[in-house]
Image (tube, rainbow, N blue to C red):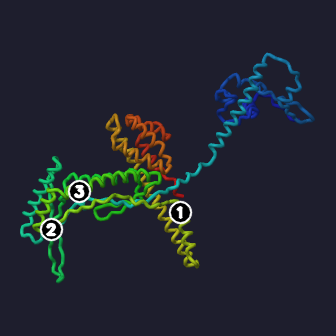
């Protein structure tokens, strides 16, 4: 025979009650029917209450065994009659239904928390490679050999005076122009080394030269605004960049190039007008003492020469497959070559993706640096440089469908609404899901996390 222990067991009672209500028991807190979360023994009266007070479950002996009678069976045995606690029982039933719903919500929440993190979605990177071509000031320059002159400096100073006098007719604020002579060493047919003196100058007025410089600066500013740098190469004292133009920004860049070319066509007309003027004739007649020259400068046009390009893995696989189909016969040696080609292309693709990642981060970090500088200077309004940097980073990230696009667009909208940089920075932190974070903390977070989720 089993002996029943009639002592109260509040913890077990609470657990039975929770299971009946459809709520999983918790170690410290629980909620039943939307009530406040509390531990089972927060209420001293409940701790002193016997086990059958909350949900009755009486036991009765049956053949030497203990049979537990559930509350439902007990309710059927007793006749239905209205007692003074009927309202409490109805409240318990309502609480039971609410508890079941609450339990389902908790289970769903626990399943969501326990689910493994999803992989970063694949962001297709496709666009155009840019081969920039833009006329320079060299198209307006003239070279004259003054080696035969016994006193080339006197000739040079006389030419400078004429050019500055002509220049004053076109610009009141023009600075004095200086002509330069470069020395080149050459060897004649006999192998004897000689020195040549080459005079380099531009006979055209400063407004024409400056307009050509501005057109070139506008083109490269547009490239920095709409493109990412895919690769860089240093050639002498200059640094050349291979620009990547996202597909979504191609129309904006082409429109800017068309505007630049319209300005260059207008400039070409002004060049031709100057070449037919008396001012140009005075310069050519003076230089004719040493060498006859003819002024016929062709400015030309700017172009970006876009080449379709993709950094998707499928592009590499398709390219290798086309190379395989083009072979009439594939032996072991050619198959090894194809595998080597695919490996090299894949390595190059990953390197380019890494370069794009770095270029995109530099744009975003440049925005944060300027924003932090504006906050330190306690500026009431953002600078043009800051607005331009934010606009560039937001538009490129949006065209690549990056997660950072929305926070940058919100920041751009706030700054264009003439909000204080400090207020816009707080909004950026909230949009990034880090309210109260400083610019330095946001910078560290962006520098540590990948922006392009494309490197498989």
* Label 3 crowd bin: few (<14), some (14–19), many (20+), radius 10 Å: many
Query: Mark 1 or mark 2, which has the lower sequence index?
Result: 2
Q: Nearer the viewer, residue 49 or 76?
A: 76
Task: Point out residue 390 in the picture as x, y percentages from the top left corner.
Answer: 40, 44
Q: Few, some or many C-alpha atoms within 10 Å of disc 1 (few <14, some 14-19, many ≥20)?
A: some
Relative depth, front residue between 28 and 252: 252
Choose mark 1 or mark 2, whichever is in front: 2
The foreground one among 161 and 3 is: 161
Left or right placement of residue 49 versus residue 167 in this view: right
Residue, disc 2: 292
Q: Residue 11 occupies which quadrant of the picture?
A: top right
Of the two numbered discs 3 and 1 in the rendering, the one whose residue sits closer to the viewer? 3
Question: Can you say whether 106 is above or below 45 in the image?
Answer: below
Mark drawn on residue 255: none
Q: Is residue 164 above or below residue 77?
A: below
For the residues labelled 2 and 3, the Cα–Cα distance comes to: 20 Å
Kindly state the secondary structure of the residue where label 2 is placed. loop
Q: Position of residue 414 (x, y in %)?
A: 42, 37
Dot 3 or dot 1, earlier in sequence:
3
State the separation of the CA atoms marked 3 and 1.
47 Å
Extreme residue toward the bottom, this view:
190
Q: Quick one: SS at disc 3?
A: helix
Question: In screen coordinates, is 232 left or right of 30?
Answer: left
Tell me which numbered mark, 2 or 3, is placed earlier along the sequence. Answer: 3
What secondary structure is found at the residue carrying circle 1?
helix
Where is residue 279 shown, x and y percent of the image?
14, 56
Which label is found at residue 271?
A: 3
Q: Which residue in the structure is indicated by mark 1?
A: 315
């Amino acid at each position: 025979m089993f002996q029943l222990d009639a002592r109260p067991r509040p913890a077990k009672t609470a657990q039975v009650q929770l299971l009946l209500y459809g709520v999983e028991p918790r170690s410290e807190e629980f909620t039943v029917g939307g009530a406040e979360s509390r531990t089972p023994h927060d209420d001293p009266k409940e701790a002193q209450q016997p086990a059958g007070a909350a949900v009755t479950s009486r036991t009765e002996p049956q053949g030497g065994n203990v049979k537990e009678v559930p509350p439902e069976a007990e309710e059927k045995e007793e006749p239905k009659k209205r007692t003074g606690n009927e309202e409490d029982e109805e409240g318990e039933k309502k609480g039971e239904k609410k508890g079941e719903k609450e339990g389902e919500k908790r289970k769903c929440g626990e399943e969501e928390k326990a689910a493994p993190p999803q992989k970063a979605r694949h962001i297709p990177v496709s666009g155009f490679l840019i081969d920039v071509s833009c006329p320079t000031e060299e198209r307006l320059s003239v070279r004259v050999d003054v080696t035969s002159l016994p006193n080339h400096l006197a000739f040079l100073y006389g030419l400078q005076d004429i050019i500055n006098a002509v220049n004053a007719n076109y610009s009141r604020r023009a600075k004095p122009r200086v002509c330069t002579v470069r020395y080149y060493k050459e060897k004649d047919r006999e192998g004897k080394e000689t020195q040549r003196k080459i005079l380099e100058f531009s006979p055209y007025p400063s407004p024409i030269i400056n307009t050509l410089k501005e057109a070139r600066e506008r083109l490269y500013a547009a490239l920095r605004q709409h493109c990412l740098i895919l690769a860089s190469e240093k050639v002498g004292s200059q640094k050349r960049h291979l620009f990547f133009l996202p597909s979504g920004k191609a129309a904006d860049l082409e429109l800017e190039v068309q505007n630049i070319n319209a300005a260059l066509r207008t400039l070409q007309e002004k060049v031709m007008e100057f070449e037919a003027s008396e001012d140009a004739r005075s310069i050519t007649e003076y230089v004719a003492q040493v060498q006859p020259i003819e002024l016929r400068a062709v400015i030309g046009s700017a172009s970006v020469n876009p080449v379709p390009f993709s950094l998707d893995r499928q592009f590499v696989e398709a390219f290798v497959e086309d190379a395989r189909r083009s072979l009439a016969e594939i032996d072991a040696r050619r198959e090894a070559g194809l595998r080597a080609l695919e490996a090299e292309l894949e390595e190059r693709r990953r390197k380019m993706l890494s370069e794009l990642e770095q270029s995109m981060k530099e744009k975003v970090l440049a925005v944060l640096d300027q924003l932090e500088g504006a906050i330190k200077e306690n500026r009431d309004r953002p600078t043009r440089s800051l607005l331009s940097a934010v606009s560039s980073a937001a538009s490129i990230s949006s065209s690549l469908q990056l997660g950072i696009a929305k926070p940058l667009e919100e920041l751009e909208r706030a700054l264009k609404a003439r909000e204080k940089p400090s207020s816009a920075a707080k909004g950026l932190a909230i949009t990034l899901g880090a309210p109260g974070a400083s610019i330095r903390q946001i910078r560290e977070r962006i520098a540590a996390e990948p922006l392009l989720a494309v490197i498989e």
